[in-house]
Image (cartoon, rainbow, N blue to C red):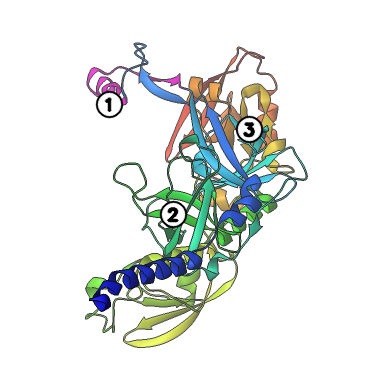
C-alpha cells in the first residue's frame, strides 16, 4: 500500500525538477533590453499628400466611387490634400545621430520626428531611402547618443532565439521574443525581389516596422519589416531585413546618395516542371529563360536553357535565390557562375553590370549630397542631374532632362508633380541640368504659373505649376 502511495508524490517531484531545469535553460532577455532600449526610437512621419477626387468637390467620396465618376460620367479628377501620419520604429546606429528605419515608414513624408526613450522629440532629416530594400536612413541633430551594436546576420540559424523592441500600435518600447523560423526566405518577385528575409515567429505588429531584431549577444541582426497575415495582425510569421543588407544600403546612401544593385542580364524561372527534360537530379537551380543582349551574362556566354546552380559559391536552391545574391554584388566585379548545360557542369566568369534604377526610387540628399544643392525653393521642388548611364536607360538624349527628387506636399497636391518625374522644359526652355532648371526658374514669382514639360513612365505632357506664395 505504501509503495503505491509514493508514486504520485514522486511524479510531482520529477515534474517540478523538470520544470526547474527548463526554466533555467530559457534565456533571460532583461540584460539585452536594459542595454539597448535607449538606442531604440519611435518614428512619426507626417505627410499632407493628396488623393484624386471628382472636380465636383466631393472630397469625402470613397476611392471606388470616385473612380466610377471618372470612368462613366467623364468627370475630371483633381488632387486634393489629405493629411496622414505613419508610425513606426527605428534605432540609432551611430552616436552622432544616424537612425535606421524602414523606407515605407517615411515614404512621401513632409516631416519626420523621432522620440527617444528620455521623451525628447527630435526632428529628423531623411538622408536617403531605398524602397527596393525598404531601408531609410535618418539623421537627427544630436550627439553622444547611445547606439546599437551591429551583428552578423549571415551567422543566424533556424531555431536561434531573437528579440524585438519597437512601438506596436504606438506602445513604445514593447519587447517581444521568439526564434528564427528560417533564413534566406525569398518572397518572390513582388516589390522586394532582392531581399532574402529572416523569418521569425517574434510577435510583430503595425508600429514595429523599422525596429531592431537582436540576437542573444545583444547585437542587431535584422530590421523588422513586414508580416504575413490574412487579418492585418500578427499570425506567427514575421520577416526582417538582414542587417548586413541594411548596413550596405546605409553606406551606399552616405557615399553616393543612392543604392546600386548588381545585374547579370538574365531572366530566370523555376526548374520544377523541367527536371526530367533537363536531366536534373532534383529541382534545385534557376532556369535561364532570357539573356539580355550586350549584358555581362551575354558576353560571358550564358544561354537560354542553361541552369544556374551556384553564384560565387552560393548554391541556388530555387530561382528566387539568385536576385538577392546578384543584387548585393558590387557592379563591375566578376562573379563565378556555375551552370548545367546539356547535362554537363561548367563555370563561367561573368562581369556584373548595374541594375537600372527605378525612376521613382531617387534618394533624398543628405549632408553633402547633390540634391541638397539643387533644391529650388521658390518652385517647391528639388531636382537632381541624371547621370549618363541612367539617362540612356530612360531613353533620354544626352543633356536632356532632370529628375524631381522631392516635391513639397502643397505643390504635389496642386500640380500632380511627384518624385521621379523627368522635367524636360520649363516655360519653353530646354532643361539638361539642375543649373538649367534653377536658371529657368529665376524669373518665376510667387503666384505665377510655370509650364513644365514632364515625362512620367512612357508618357510626356505639359503640366502647370502655380508657384506657392511665400510663407
Above/below status of 250 relative to 376: below
**Residue assigned mark 1:** 64
**Residue assigned mark 2:** 202
User: In the shown orientation, is residue 243 left or right of residue 3?
Assistant: right
**Quadrant of the rendering where the N terminus is positioned:** bottom left
Place of residue 191 in the rendered image (x, y in percent of width and height, measured from the top left) = 41, 50
**Residue assigned mark 3:** 382
Mark found first going from the N terminus, 1 or 3: 1
**Quadrant of the rendering where the C terminus is positioned:** top right
User: Which residue sits furthest right?
Assistant: 144
Q: CA distance from mark 2 to mark 3?
A: 40 Å
| Secondary-structure class at tag 2 | loop
Verify whether residue 69 appears in magenta.
yes
Q: Is residue 252 visible?
A: yes
Which-is-in-front pick, marks 2 and 3?
A: 2
Mark found first going from the N terminus, 1 or 2: 1
Q: Report the residue at 37% width, 56% height from top.
A: 189
Local packing at callout 1 (Cα closer than 10 Å; few below 14, some 14-19, many 20+) is: few
Place of residue 21 in the rendered image (x, y in percent of width and height, measured from the top left) = 46, 70
Q: Report the residue at 34% width, 73% height from top.
A: 10
Q: Quadrant of residue 22?
A: bottom left
Q: Which residues are magenta?
A: 63-82
| Secondary-structure class at tag 3 | strand
Q: CA distance from mark 1 to mark 3?
A: 33 Å
User: In the shown orientation, is residue 437 left or right of residue 109?
Assistant: right
Q: CA distance from mark 1 to mark 2?
A: 36 Å
User: Which residue sits furthest front?
Assistant: 1
Amino acid at each position: 500500500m505504501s509503495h503505491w502511495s509514493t508514486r504520485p508524490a514522486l511524479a510531482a517531484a520529477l515534474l517540478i525538477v523538470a520544470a526547474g531545469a527548463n526554466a533555467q535553460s530559457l534565456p533571460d532577455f532583461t540584460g539585452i533590453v536594459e542595454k539597448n532600449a535607449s538606442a531604440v526610437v519611435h518614428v512619426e512621419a507626417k505627410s499632407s499628400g493628396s488623393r484624386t477626387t471628382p472636380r465636383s468637390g466631393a472630397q469625402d467620396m470613397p476611392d471606388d466611387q470616385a473612380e466610377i465618376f471618372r470612368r462613366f460620367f467623364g468627370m475630371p479628377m483633381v488632387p486634393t490634400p489629405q493629411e496622414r501620419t505613419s508610425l513606426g520604429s527605428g534605432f540609432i546606429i551611430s552616436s552622432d545621430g544616424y537612425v535606421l528605419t524602414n523606407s515605407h515608414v517615411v515614404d512621401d513624408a513632409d516631416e519626420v520626428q523621432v522620440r527617444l526613450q528620455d521623451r525628447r522629440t527630435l526632428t529628423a532629416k531623411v538622408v536617403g531611402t531605398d524602397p527596393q530594400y525598404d531601408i531609410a536612413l535618418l539623421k537627427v541633430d544630436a550627439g553622444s547618443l547611445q547606439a546599437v551594436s551591429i551583428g552578423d546576420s549571415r551567422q543566424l540559424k533556424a531555431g536561434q532565439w531573437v528579440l524585438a523592441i519597437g512601438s506596436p500600435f504606438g506602445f513604445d518600447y514593447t519587447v517581444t521574443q521568439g526564434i528564427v523560423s528560417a533564413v534566406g526566405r525569398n518572397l518572390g518577385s513582388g516589390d522586394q525581389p532582392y531581399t532574402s528575409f529572416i523569418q521569425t515567429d517574434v510577435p510583430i505588429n503595425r508600429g514595429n516596422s523599422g525596429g531592431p531584431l537582436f540576437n542573444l549577444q545583444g547585437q542587431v541582426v535584422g530590421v523588422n519589416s513586414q508580416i504575413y497575415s490574412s487579418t492585418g495582425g500578427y499570425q506567427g510569421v514575421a520577416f526582417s531585413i538582414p542587417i548586413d543588407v541594411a548596413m550596405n544600403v546605409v553606406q551606399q546612401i552616405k557615399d553616393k546618395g543612392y543604392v546600386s544593385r548588381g545585374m547579370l542580364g538574365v531572366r530566370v524561372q523555376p526548374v520544377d516542371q523541367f527536371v526530367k527534360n533537363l536531366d536534373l537530379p532534383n529541382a534545385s537551380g534557376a532556369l535561364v529563360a532570357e539573356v539580355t543582349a550586350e549584358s555581362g551574362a551575354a558576353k560571358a556566354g550564358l544561354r537560354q536553357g542553361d541552369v544556374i546552380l551556384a553564384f560565387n559559391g552560393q548554391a541556388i536552391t530555387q530561382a528566387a535565390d539568385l536576385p538577392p545574391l546578384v543584387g548585393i554584388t558590387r557592379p563591375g566585379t566578376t562573379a563565378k557562375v556555375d551552370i548545367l548545360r546539356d547535362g554537363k557542369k561548367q563555370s563561367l566568369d561573368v562581369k556584373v553590370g548595374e541594375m537600372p534604377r527605378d525612376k521613382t526610387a531617387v534618394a533624398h540628399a543628405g549632408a553633402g549630397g547633390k540634391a541638397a544643392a539643387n533644391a529650388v525653393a521658390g518652385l517647391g521642388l528639388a531636382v537632381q542631374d541624371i547621370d549618363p548611364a541612367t539617362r540612356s536607360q530612360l531613353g533620354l538624349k544626352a543633356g536632356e532632362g532632370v529628375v524631381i527628387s522631392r516635391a513639397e506636399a502643397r505643390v504635389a497636391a496642386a500640380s500632380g508633380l511627384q518624385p521621379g518625374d523627368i522635367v524636360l522644359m520649363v516655360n519653353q526652355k530646354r532643361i539638361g541640368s539642375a543649373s538649367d532648371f534653377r536658371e529657368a526658374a529665376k524669373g518665376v514669382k510667387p503666384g505665377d504659373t510655370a509650364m513644365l514639360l514632364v515625362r512620367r513612365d512612357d508618357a510626356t505632357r505639359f503640366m502647370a505649376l502655380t508657384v506657392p506664395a511665400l510663407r
